[in-house]
Image (tube, rainbow, N blue to C red):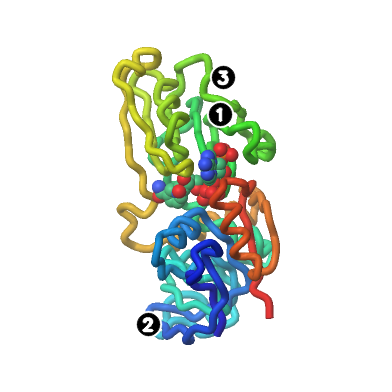
Amino acid sequence: MRAFVASPAPETLACLAEVPEPEPTSDQALVSVEAFSLNRPDYLYLAIPGSTFRPGIDAVGRILHPAADGSGPAAGSRVLLHSPEGGAAAERIAVSTGQIASVPDSLDSATAAALPLGGLVARRLLDRLGDLAGRRLVATGVGGGVGQFLVQSAGGAEITAVAAQDEPWEHLPQLGAKVAHRASDLTDASFDAALESVGGELGSAIASKLRTGGTFLWFGQAGGEPITLDFFGLFSGGQSLTLHHFVYSQGMTGGDREDLEALVVLAASGHLRAEIGHRGSWEETPSVLQRLGAGRMAGKAVLSVTG
Ligand SMILES: NC(=O)c1ccc[n+]([C@@H]2O[C@H](COP(=O)([O-])OP(=O)(O)OC[C@H]3O[C@@H](n4cnc5c(N)ncnc54)[C@H](OP(=O)(O)O)[C@@H]3O)[C@@H](O)[C@H]2O)c1
């Protein structure tokens, strides 16, 4: 079968190749992939020199062979899947049934393919904060896949996105966020929580916008530079914070099915929508990966597996 693999020419990141058919273990179903979405980790793993990563963490398709142990949906069922180890940018993939959720016909394929990783990260970030009612959140790096779900899921909280004027940000107010283009535009230091995923100067500056005792959820470094925290710099803000290094899969031992099913219900009922910044054929995978790497994709990119 055909699948995208790490490219021997590093500048193209990934290329189509003929690979062996997947061999499902007893708890895995074989899925025929209709479309997949690309995520920042696809880019990050492929950019590692000598990478053997196969892209495709999130996809939508149909069950070709159900799992031999009897778990999961029946043959022919329409499903979305989340495969943290990649491999879904392929004609077929074997996936644990703990990583699959059924998709109703009413939910379009692009939305289904866009939901898993971004939706799981957003959901679990917000879970970390507990009751959101009346709280004020500030978030960075939310122009892409995770951010759109974060903004929509923030419930009773007010969320301010810090997004540079020349980055994709126009969809964020429609989804419910206030937008500031620089940290310095935030004149008050009274946010209850900061959700930080850019790093560098912006990430460092956001820490000083928290109220005393605020929460700093640190979940990425899209700009490539680490944050630095200046002890004296915090005197201009709340003067004390709790910092959490957040990894969405931490502590999740039973698979992601329950949360994936919850995301499907929210999307199918119109309570969560996916901003699709690019739709195309899977042949566009290398160029879409480059756009993702540069932070130039508004929302998600969804690519169809074509003959
Ligand atoms: N901790 C975890 O478990 C976990 C899991 C998955 C993903 N993540 C992280 O979550 C963050 C968002 O993921 P995503 O899938 O939404 O990524 P994405 O679609 O690539 O979006 C990343 C966003 O980062 C911002 N950005 C600012 N400077 C950038 C730069 N120099 N290069 C690239 N992007 C830049 C952009 O938003 P603005 O336009 O708003 O600046 C961009 O839209 C990433 O940092 C990712 O690594 C963390």
Label 3 sits on what residue type?
Asp
Label 2 sits on what residue type?
Thr
* Placement of 298 over or under 256, stated as above or below: above
Quadrant housing the C terminus: bottom right
* Dot 3 or dot 1, earlier in sequence: 1
Q: Is mark 2 within 8 Å of ligand 1?
A: no
Tell me the element at label 3: helix
In the image, residue 243 lies at what x, y percent? 32, 33
* Placement of 7 over or under 227, stated as above or below: below
Which residue is label 1 attached to? Answer: 160
Left or right of 236? Residue 275 is right
Q: Are marks 2 and 1 in contact (CB under 8 Å)?
A: no
In the image, residue 63 lies at what x, y percent? 55, 79
* Dot 2 or dot 1, earlier in sequence: 2
Residue occupying the point 46% across, 23% down: 191
Which of labels 3 and 1 is toward the front? 3
Residue occupying the point 65% across, 53% down: 269
CA separation, marks 2 and 1?
45 Å
State the image quarter where residue 27 is shown. Answer: bottom left
Which residue is label 3 attached to? Answer: 185
Which of labels 2 and 3 is toward the front? 3
Left or right of 149? Residue 67 is left
Judging depth in this view, the residue of 157 and 197 nearest the camera is 197
* Placement of 138 over or under 67, stated as above or below: above
State the image quarter where residue 16 is shown. Answer: bottom right
Label 1 sits on what residue type?
Thr
User: How many neighbours does mark 2 have within 10 angstroms: few (below 14), some (14-19), or many (20 or more)?
Assistant: some
State the image quarter where residue 245 is shown. Answer: top left
- The answer to whether residue 146 is visible is no
Residue occupying the point 62% across, 49% down: 297
Residue occupying the point 52% across, 30% down: 157
Which residue is label 2 attached to? Answer: 25
